[in-house]
Amino acid sequence: MVAEKKDPLLIKRYASRRLYNTETSDYVTLEDIAGFIRSGRDVQIVDLKSGDDLTRQYLLQIIAEHEGRGESVLPLNVLTDLVRSYTTDIQSVVPQFLAQSFEMLRQGQEQMMQKFGSPFPGFEALQAQQEAWLKAMTGGRAPGWTGPETEAESETREDLGEIKKQLAELQEKLSKMQ
């Protein structure tokens, strides 16, 4: 289960690029930070000198390291589409789409948990990883974030509505099968 919501754990990056945990007054590694996140703790990583927020770049680095070690979560076509989204007009739609998609997945998991309990060992850790990935990919925006909506975003929202409807139908069929 995700830990009680607290203020983010503040990690300071020194000029030497070492990362310093301000709560425990010791140096930490990227793997330590990944562990904090898996346990449900939010982190904020800031540059000591400039005060710049470096959280996004470090979360992406953690994801890249896991993917590089063969712990692949992201299919190649998804990675390709993400790269393409940075060079197209749909770039502004992608964060909201990803946030809503993960929110739907999270809701489906919660419903499954309510019906059947934890489906497999380590499920909670997987959920924490998923939330960390979502935050990294959306810049920390909350699921369902809405800003000025473009025509493309409106179409995407309609497509998401259709996907939600299909997911609900599949969930209904699954519950009838049991």
Image (cartoon, grey):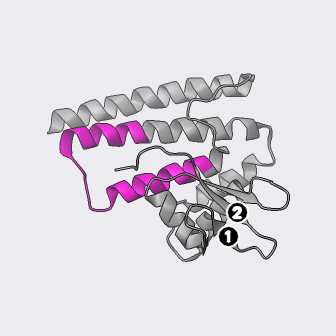
Q: Residues within 10 Å of mark 2 (few under 14, many from 20)?
A: many
The residue under the point 40% across, 50% down is: 3
Which residue is nearer to you in this view: 138 or 94?
138
Q: Secondary structure at mark 1?
A: strand
Q: CA distance from mark 2 to mark 1?
A: 6 Å
Upstream in sequence: badge 2 or badge 1: 2
Query: Would you place residue 17 above or below residue 75 in this image?
Result: below
The residue under the point 41% across, 41% down is: 106
The residue under the point 75% across, 24% down is: 150
Determine which residue is flagged by label 1.
19
The amino acid marked with disc number 2 is: Lys
Q: What is the x, y in percent for residue 112?
A: 27, 41
Which residue is nearer to you in this view: 49 or 175?
49
The label number, if any, that marks residue 45 in the structure image: none
> Is 133 in the magenta?
yes
Q: What is the x, y in percent for residue 125?
A: 39, 59
Name the quarter where the C terminus is drawn.
top left
Which residue is nearer to you in this view: 151 or 51?
51
The residue under the point 16% across, 38% down is: 177
Q: Is residue 118 left or right of residue 31?
A: left
Query: Would you place residue 88 above or below residue 128 in this image?
Result: above
Q: What is the x, y in percent for residue 66?
A: 55, 70
Q: Secondary structure at mark 2?
A: strand
Q: Which residues are magenta?
A: 106-135
The amino acid marked with disc number 1 is: Leu
Q: Quadrant of residue 99?
A: top right
Q: Main secondary structure of the magenta part?
A: helix
Does the residue at mark 2 contact the one at mark 1 (Cβ under 8 Å)?
Answer: yes
The label number, if any, that marks residue 12 in the structure image: 2
> Is 20 in the magenta?
no
Q: What is the x, y in percent for residue 45?
A: 68, 58
Query: Would you place residue 136 above or below residue 95 in this image?
Result: below
